[in-house]
Image (cartoon, grey):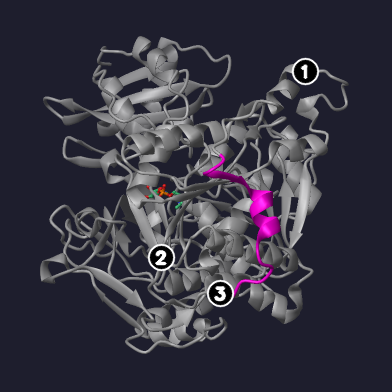
Amino acid sequence: MADGVFVPPPPRLVEGAHCSSMQQYNDMYKQSIDDPEAFWGAIADQFYWKERHTGKFCDYNFDASKGKVFIEWMRGAKTNICYNALDRHVQGGHADRVAFFWEGNEPADEDRLTYGQLLERVQRCASGLRALGVARGHCVAVYLPMIPELVVTLLACARIGAVHSVVFGGFSADALADRVLDAKCDVMVTSDGFWRGNKLVHLKEIADHAAELCAARDHRLRRVVVVRHLPRLHQHQHPANGAGGGDAQPAKRAQFDVQASWDAARDLWWEDMMSEAALECEPEWMDAEDPLFMLYTSGSTGKPKGVLHTTAGYMLYAATTFKYTFDYHLEDVYWCTADIGWITGHSYVAYGPMLNCATSVMFEGSPFYPSGERPWQIIDKYKVSKFYTAPTAIRALMRLGDDIVTKHSRQSLKVLGSVGEPINPEAWLWYHRVVGGGRCAVVDTFWQTETGGHVLTPLPAATPTKPGSACRPFFGVQPALLDENGAEIAGEGEGYLVFRRPWPGIMRTVYGNHQRFETTYFKKFNGFYCTGDGARRDADGYLWVTGRIDDMLNVSGHLLSTAQIESALIEHPSVSEAAVVAVPHSIKGEAVYCFITNKQGEPWTDELRKELILKVRERIGAFAAPDYLQCAPGLPKTRSGKIMRRVLRKIAQDDRDLGDVSTMADESVIALLFQHRTAQLL
Ligand code: WT7
């Protein structure tokens, strides 16, 4: 896609938008950089504070060579994020507004929860947790499926000043135990189990196993609260359980009766905790810089880190990015498909929407169950206007053809968001043209667990977009591009994407290891937060994130991003997915090794290999042409859908020592990939 091609904001979104022109964006951006206190102070005025800040509005050191790296916003201010997400709205007359339409794995499973009902449940849960001995500063492990109790638990923790650590329901007992141990959680909230598509996950059994692993390492999980979720589905006449077809699937029904072990001294049912708990629960008034939650990074790049976010800065940033990036208005219905086990779920399923009193869809299931029509059905069912998902889902849905999308109305849609990895222009354009019918803004939002919220993103009614570019910085964010020596690249160019100063939502430390925080993010370039991603700035000043730096290749002195090559390969009509890694090469430094997944039924031939090489030569240049091309029936991915290139690098080099694969979604692809390895230089 040529750099110069702009897709203007859809005119119908402009009127009434929170930011409705580039002029307004530029003015607001300028103020956010020149006078952060005035900019964020005016936003802070819309929230409830028990006390306002006493010290500096923002204080920080980004230069590790000059002492400890630290970031503080509004030190001394007292607030509570749960109060701001619930009580404030209920007092403002919104008790009956729907906060969440809950849509279960089966299309027949649905529920809704108003702000008033949520406040009631959160207070009970908060009192219940307090009664179990959870106090301010304690860390609670949350291991739940995408059910309303998950949001209730997070807000309840926040209400009493406990730090939540959500562990994605797809993680294994080992991964769960590691996270419980690292944060020294002695209370966990989990559930009996859940269905994901046709698969039943016995969550409580995994939690029990994790508790044993902790015990073997001298750590005791004192209390485990268990949400009874499976019988609830049963009541809804869960189709997978035989409803509609008599006892069509007795095996599935029988599985409902399987009970995990029960330790009466430790385990208690959620409903028992709730029924015995006090109805009201005064919030704890937290300091602006008190911890709110920790979340372990997805692990596509090594041992997980407990990323720590604090109270006030995160609150302002999650709320403000949500409001502007999706141009959220009270009449909207918003749906983010991410699991709350990831940061996207924290900021853009839970906190961001609720702080804006939004109405959202919360979806338990998979976009492909019962079929790939599910997302479009849900969008029509709830009249979703703002939709947020990941490129990996977009590409997979794209593969199913246009018809199953276009047979649904989708008239309610206005803004389509993307997050998680670079989106290739082909997928971007499909999202825009087919899903959005050419009427919607596509916002490619770049950010990280560490950044708390969007840091590069277009704004739907203001920014002329370019397919594949995350465009411009969000308010308060000052990006720069540096070369390997730390010299700044002005104007057009490509280098390391770094940030010059903190915005309110940036992480404050790695839990229990501040030194790791400094070395990971601040040691490489003094005075800058280093994202670990590469980016290119084009002639219009637009930023194109090219992927992780460790996903970069250096071929004959040319710095190349794997994403660039992948994007070219994916353009071939026979290819559905491509992943590129570097392998050592005696002359070029690094050689380009490509894994190619064909579209269903497409053969793997010499001719195809030739065409692929031509594609890359054509799109990037001869120096970038693949050195190795191998057929890949599947790719190793994390449970959040990221391609694990570090594993692919090992396969490319025929190294069987793959390292930690605990975050891999499906390990069975590995054997196949070794079988299809190629040592043949093209
Ligand atoms: C990494 C962060 C932030 C929520 C989801 C992932 C990649 C994320 C984009 C984007 C290009 C992107 C980066 C980043 N990434 N969004 N729009 N364009 N790359 O959170 O697990 O912390 O991963 O995801 O490589 O560093 P995460």
Q: Distance between the residues labelled 3 and 1?
A: 47 Å
Image label count = 3
Amino acid beneath label 3: Pro
Indicate yes or no whether the magenta region holds residue 268: yes
User: Residue 94, how many percent across, how many down?
Assistant: 75, 74
Front residue of this view, candidates 290 and 503: 290
- Tag 1 secondary structure: helix
**Residue tagged 1:** 250
User: For residue 119, which quarter of the picture?
Assistant: bottom right
Q: Is residue 217 above or below residue 31?
A: above
User: Residue 450, how many percent across, how many down?
Assistant: 37, 57
Circles 3 and 1: CB atoms closer than 8 Å? no
Q: How far apart are marks 2 and 3 (CA)?
A: 14 Å
The residue segment tinted magenta is: 264-283
Local packing at callout 1 (Cα closer than 10 Å; few below 14, some 14-19, many 20+) is few
Task: Give the residue displayed 40% in from the left and 74% down from the top.
Answer: 476
